[in-house]
Amino acid sequence: MSLVGNWSYPTAIKFGPGRIKELPEACEAAGMKRPLLVTDKGLADLPITTATLDIMEAAGLGRGLFSDVDPNPNEMNLDAGVAAYKAGGHDGVIAFGGGSGLDLGKMVAFMAGQTRPVWDFEDIGDWWTRADADAIAPIIAVPTTAGTGSEVGRASVITNSETHAKKIIFHPKVLPTVVICDPELTVGMPKFITAGTGLDAFAHCVEAFSSPHYHPMSQGIALEGMRLVMEYLPRAYADGTDIEARAQMMSAAAMGATAFQKGLGAIHAMSHPVGAVFNTHHGTTNAVCMPSVLDFNAPAIADRFQSAAAYLNINGGFDGFRAFVQGFNDSLGIPRKLSDLGVTEAAIPELVKGAIIDPSCGGNPIELTEGNLTTLFKAAL
């Protein structure tokens, strides 16, 4: 089976091993002559980043690099990135990395031409229309993990460093013009990042599938995304050089982010404030929260997971699926409790306040309140 394709859903995606070599053509298609590559601190000095900068330089695109990006990027990282973009006379952004590098890169391109503060564009109502759409720079996204799917998303998550709240910043033109999904870039991911990012993709699919909103295309993508993670994440975890497993996980990541156009839910509503306050890994936090949320949502989702379980070759319907999830987490070295990630009971009131205002709440199949979120956090703790 060939693992190469050219897709335009939801945007133009160059998919396949070795396709990072096509970055110069992607820049030309996006109208970039002096791109700024934005990535996180951990990736800046790695061979995949150096090799990508070499490709840019050989094509006459320079080697503009900004890497002052934290694991949970904030507005200070963003201000520094915009300053670097303007100082270098750049005309577009290559967002490179996992969720943090992709999210911040997209926001640098978005904010470089705006005059209002980034919080004015939070994903609330039609706030996105406040932006000067013509001033948004072109974006190429190059994921180096298989998890967030931010490469095919129209938003970024930015942490407010003062309030420790994670905010979702949305605009249709934040969707990258071209995506290069090269699974060879993910081969060096350590086991715990492979597990955490892979389970982030799984959580996106599970929550999209659970969401009560109507979107049959997303529903189908979510179901097949779950299957790919179940089949290929254990292989990628066991052998990081298994290029077929890495490619299938990269597909699952893009599928999860495409599917959650249908909505997310309590898993993400809980995970966002935990990550903001305790600086935990996002995908790992999602995985820890998932069993408790499945239990909580059971009355609303058990029927639809009966059919999903059958498709996924899981016996026992919803109960079988719920048991599978806990075993899957265990097999990938995921802690069972939020307390294992450093979360304290004293923080629950603050976490509940962050969760209840998170946009993800709207996609949960059972309405979330401060009361039931408190119960959920205690169950996950």
Image (cartoon, rainbow, N blue to C red):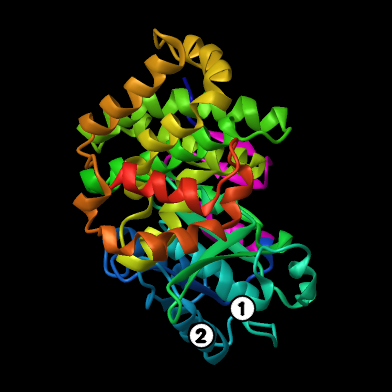
Would residue 49 be counted in the magenta stretch?
no
Q: Residue at x 36, y 45 (%)?
A: 197
Left or right: residue 10 versus residue 34 is right
- Residues at marks 2 and 1, CA–CA distance in whole angstroms: 10 Å
Q: Is residue 24 located in the magenta-colored stretch of the structure? A: yes
Q: Look at 36% across and 33% down and name the residue there.
A: 291
Residue 189 vertical placement versus 171 (above, below): above
Residue shown at the point (70%, 36%) measured from the top left: 213
Q: Position of residue 375 (x, y in %)?
A: 40, 45
The residue positioned 38% from the left and 15% from the top of the image is 320
Q: Give the number of the disc on residue 118.
A: 1
Using the image, determine if residue 215 lies above or below residue 362.
above
Q: Regarding mark 1 in the picture, which secondary structure is present there?
A: helix
Looking at the image, the residue that sits furthest to the front is 371
Q: Which residue is mark 2?
A: 79
Residue 4 point in image, percent of width and height: 52, 33
Q: Which residues fall within the magenta stretch?
A: 4-29
The part of the image, by quadrant, that contains residue 348 is bottom left
